[in-house]
Amino acid sequence: MILEALAPGHDIPVALLGELTSLYASHHEFFSLSGDFPDAHDIRPEQVAAALTEEMAHPGVEVLLARSAGRLAGVVITLAHHPDPTDPDPWIGLLIVDAREQRKGYGRELVALVEERFRRTGRDAVRLAVLDNNPRGLAFWTALGYETIGHREDLQLGRPCAVLRKALNGRT
């Protein structure tokens, strides 16, 4: 699997936007839970472009595209620094693996690559939030060694979430 960063400040090429829209649309179940799109069964390219542009407007956000055998297998959005200055850890804001490719190890591989990127920059741990109404997501992350450290509402829409953390250096 190869990771490549989506360049901020540029229009997303039409072909890539088509791939991203297909990827997002494959997860209508998650987007029904999250409420990120008006109709999770009809996710449009302009909506995906707007969502990614909004994400990339924040300092320290990186959108990483995961390719396997030349195909877009997933996308992950990371945040180098949380807006809360007392939170020292980087965050994984979103991880999506093409629903048609799930259960093939792509999610685990993508998470391992992201964790390694953070390790290389000297980060000790990583955090993320899982919507309380997403038990499959919670099961995925806890299977990868992430531990629930608290509960709070997300900053974007005030949705109830579990906050998880994983030490990257073997310590907590």
Image (cartoon, rainbow, N blue to C red):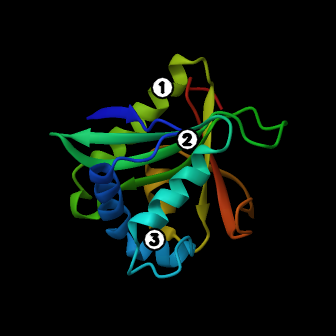
Q: Amino acid at mark 1?
A: Arg
If the image is split into quadrants, where does the C terminus sit? top right
Q: Amino acid at mark 2?
A: Thr
Vertical relation: 105 (above or below) 137: above
Q: Who's the residue at 35% across and 69% down the image? A: 25
Comparing 82 with 47, the one in front is 47
Query: Residue 147 location, x and y as percent?
Result: 60, 48
Quote the CA–CA distance across marks 2 and 1: 11 Å
Q: Who's the residue at 22% across and 57% down the image? A: 101
Quote the CA–CA distance across marks 1 and 3: 26 Å
Query: Residue 164 location, x and y as percent?
Result: 62, 50
Element at label 1: helix
Left or right of 72 on screen, residue 48 = right
Q: Which callout, 2 or 3, points at the residue further toward the start of the chain?
A: 3
Q: Residues within 10 Å of mark 1 (few under 14, many from 20)?
A: few
Q: Residues within 10 Å of mark 2 (few under 14, many from 20)?
A: many
Element at label 3: helix
Is there CB contact under 8 Å for labels 2 and 1? Answer: yes
The quadrant where residue 61 appears: top right
Left or right of 164 on screen, residue 99 = left
Q: Which callout, 2 or 1, points at the residue further toward the start of the chain?
A: 2
Vertical relation: 63 (above or below) 31: above
Q: Which mark is residue 27?
A: none
User: In the rendered image, which residue does mark 3 sit on?
Assistant: 30
Vertical relation: 12 (above or below) 157: above
User: In the rendered image, which residue does mark 1 sit on?
Assistant: 117
Comparing 77 with 8, the one in front is 8
Q: Amino acid at mark 3?
A: Phe
Query: Residue 46 location, x and y as percent?
Result: 45, 65
User: In the rendered image, which residue does mark 2 sit on?
Assistant: 78
Q: Who's the residue at 61% across and 70% down the image? A: 132
Element at label 2: strand
